[in-house]
Image (cartoon, rainbow, N blue to C red):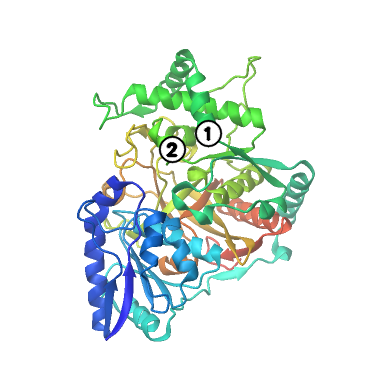
């Protein structure tokens, strides 16, 4: 019986690896049975660790030790039911000579789909050949056929007929003029992307080489999380109280408790208020048009989570922050923030803010995790509904009821020992543009498409939250002309960028304008799916 190697990459945080292990073990058993049914033996290349109570690769150091024992000429499956740090194993995948398959179970409970997409995007950037599969049931025909193809031929092919190359000639004149004016501005005046330490959570795919940004007229200001921490400590208690009171006056609900280890407390939120003020002032000092905070390693050991800060920065209406002379910094507009310092999302968010502002469309935009999707269990719609779920915060502009319709929960202790509040809400009904910048073949590329956000019954929303992370904001999205499997087959990232427009027609215009801008700045652009009425772009 031919041997197929299996490994499971995990988190850097022991608490996450321990909490999520049972889901991974169950998935591996199903996958082992599926491989065996096709006449092959699935052999794990690293053991369960009794002392740590999980069987994940938990660091780059450990990953290198594991790959020293991997046969580079035998096929390899990377099975993911959880979030994983791609850099733990990317080195071994780059040098692996035999076919590679990434597999995820179709579940929202732990972000295995998100982890697999990040690994796929990282391998795409690194030029590693791979195949990918996902399934709710590893016995279903589609999955079995794909697995059989990979086992016998070393590859799986997915339909990509929903993707078409962008034709600049198709851009309406208004959008073309806006794109041209903004591209000229980028070339002439340039823009600064503020980066608070690169490489969040092993996301190699989220780091854009400087030379690829240069063609866009965008340059990095490399900032340190230690500087953000220091500036946070310099903000006065009175200023933090003013920001907190602003939230209260706007109607934001905080779910406070008394236990610092498990509950959200006002002390945690006041620290977040100080971080928000510090972030705005640093952005102003260095002239950063957009900023990204790493969100995890390092900063999480010093401060509460940055979620409330990030969602606030992306909101058009936010607490005023003053300079030394008393003037307000960028009053009445967002300071676009790219969560988890995903620079691809940062460039996308920068383009989106410029385009939507010029067209008079809502400029507030954000990334989400492409977390999961399902049919509506309540039966209120027969359309397939995605769960776009960002890890902690979305702009209040996107939520039903704005600030008053939003609330803040403590980040799970598994991720953030020191707590911190999220900026949670249910995304409002409307037309959106979705997009993603990624790297392939040494080039920057961008996919764009159209979707709508729908409202689901409250019990269905609660079901979806319980299947994922109920402390985080949720968007019920229906993509036009792109099925679940088409999205998964094409998308080269764990994140997807979204922005609202005032109507379907205006969303189409904004999409064309952003596509035109990206193309003018040298990105290879593709349009995915259809318009809202089902017609081709």
- The percent coordinates of residue 275 (x first, y second) are 48, 27
Number of numbered discs: 2
Numbered disc 1: secondary structure: helix
Counting other residues with Cα less than 10 Å from the Cα at mark 2, is it few (<14), some (14-19), or many (20 or more)? few
Q: Is residue 101 above or below residue 206?
A: below
Q: Earlier in the sequence, mark 1 or mark 2?
A: 2
- The percent coordinates of residue 41 (x first, y second) are 26, 80
- The percent coordinates of residue 176 (x first, y second) are 74, 55
Kindly indicate whether the residue at mark 2 contacts the one at mark 1 (C-beta within 8 angstroms): no
**Toward which corner of the image does residue 166 lie, by quadrant?**
bottom right
Numbered disc 2: secondary structure: loop
- The percent coordinates of residue 226 (x first, y second) are 51, 32
The answer to whether residue 371 of the structure is visible from this angle is no
**Label disc, if present, on residue 301 of the rendered structure:** none
**Label disc, if present, on residue 313 of the rendered structure:** 1
Q: Which residue is mark 2?
A: 298
Q: Is residue 35 above or below residue 256?
A: below
Query: Which residue is at the front of the view, 271 or 457?
Result: 271
Query: Which residue is at the front of the view, 20 or 320?
Result: 20
Query: Which residue is at the front of the view, 82 or 65?
Result: 65
Instruction: Name the residue located 57 percent from the left edge and 48 percent from the top edge.
Output: 343
Query: Which residue is at the front of the view, 280 or 484?
Result: 280
Quadrant location, the C terminus = bottom right
Counting other residues with Cα less than 10 Å from the Cα at mark 1, is it few (<14), some (14-19), or many (20 or more)? many
Q: Is residue 108 left or right of residue 276?
A: left
**Toward which corner of the image does residue 212 lie, by quadrant?**
bottom right
């Amino acid at each position: 019986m031919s041997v197929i190697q299996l490994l499971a990459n995990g988190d850097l945080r022991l608490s996450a690896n321990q909490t999520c292990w049972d889901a991974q073990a169950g998935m591996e058993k199903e996958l082992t049975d599926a491989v065996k049914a096709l006449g092959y033996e699935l052999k794990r290349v690293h053991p369960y660790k009794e002392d740590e109570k999980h069987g994940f690769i938990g660091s780059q150091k450990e990953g290198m030790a594991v790959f020293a024992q991997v046969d580079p000429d035998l096929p390899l499956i990377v099975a993911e039911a959880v979030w994983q740090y791609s850099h733990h194993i990317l080195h071994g995948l780059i040098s692996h000579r035999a076919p590679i398959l990434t597999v995820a179970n179709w579940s929202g409970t732990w972000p295995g789909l998100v982890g697999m997409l990040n690994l796929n995007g990282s391998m795409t950037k690194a030029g590693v050949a791979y195949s990918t599969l996902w399934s709710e049931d590893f016995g279903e025909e589609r999955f079995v056929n794909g697995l059989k193809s990979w086992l016998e031929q070393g590859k799986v092919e997915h339909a990509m007929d929903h993707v078409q190359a962008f034709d600049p000639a198709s851009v309406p004149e208004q959008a073309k003029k806006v794109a041209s004016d903004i591209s000229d501005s980028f070339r002439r005046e340039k823009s600064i992307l503020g980066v608070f330490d690169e490489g969040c959570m092993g996301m190699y795919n989220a780091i854009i080489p400087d030379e690829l940004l240069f063609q866009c007229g965008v340059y990095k200001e490399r900032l340190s999380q230690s500087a953000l921490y220091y500036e946070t400590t310099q903000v006065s208690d009175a200023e933090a109280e003013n920001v907190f009171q602003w939230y209260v006056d706007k109607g934001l609900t905080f779910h406070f408790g008394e236990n610092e280890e498990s509950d959200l407390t006002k002390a945690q939120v006041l620290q977040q208020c100080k971080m928000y003020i510090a972030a705005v002032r640093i952005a102003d000092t260095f002239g950063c048009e957009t900023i990204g905070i790493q969100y995890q390693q390092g900063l999480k050991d010093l401060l509460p989570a940055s979620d409330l800060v990030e969602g606030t920065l992306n909101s058009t209406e936010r607490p005023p922050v003053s300079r030394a002379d008393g003037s307000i910094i960028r009053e009445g507009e967002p300071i676009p923030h790219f969560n988890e310092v995903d620079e691809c999302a940062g460039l996308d968010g920068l383009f989106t803010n410029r385009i939507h502002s010029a067209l008079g469309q809502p400029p507030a935009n954000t990334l989400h995790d492409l977390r999961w999707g399902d049919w509506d269990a309540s039966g209120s719609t027969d359309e397939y509904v995605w769960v776009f779920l960002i890890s902690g915060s979305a702009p209040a502009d996107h939520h039903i009821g704005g600030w008053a319709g939003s609330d803040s929960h403590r980040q799970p202790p598994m991720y953030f020992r020191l707590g911190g509040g999220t900026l949670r809400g249910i995304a409002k009904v409307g037309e959106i543009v979705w997009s993603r910048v990624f790297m392939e073949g040494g080039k920057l590329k961008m996919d764009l498409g159209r979707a709508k956000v729908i409202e689901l019954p409250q019990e269905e929303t609660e079901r979806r939250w319980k299947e994922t992370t109920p402390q985080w904001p949720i968007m019920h999205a229906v993509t036009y002309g792109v099925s679940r499997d088409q999205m998964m087959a094409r998308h080269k990232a764990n994140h997807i960028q979204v922005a609202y427009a005032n109507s379907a027609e205006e969303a189409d215009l904004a999409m064309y304008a952003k596509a035109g801008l990206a193309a003018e700045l040298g990105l290879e652009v593709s349009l995915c799916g259809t318009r809202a009425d089902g017609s081709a772009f």
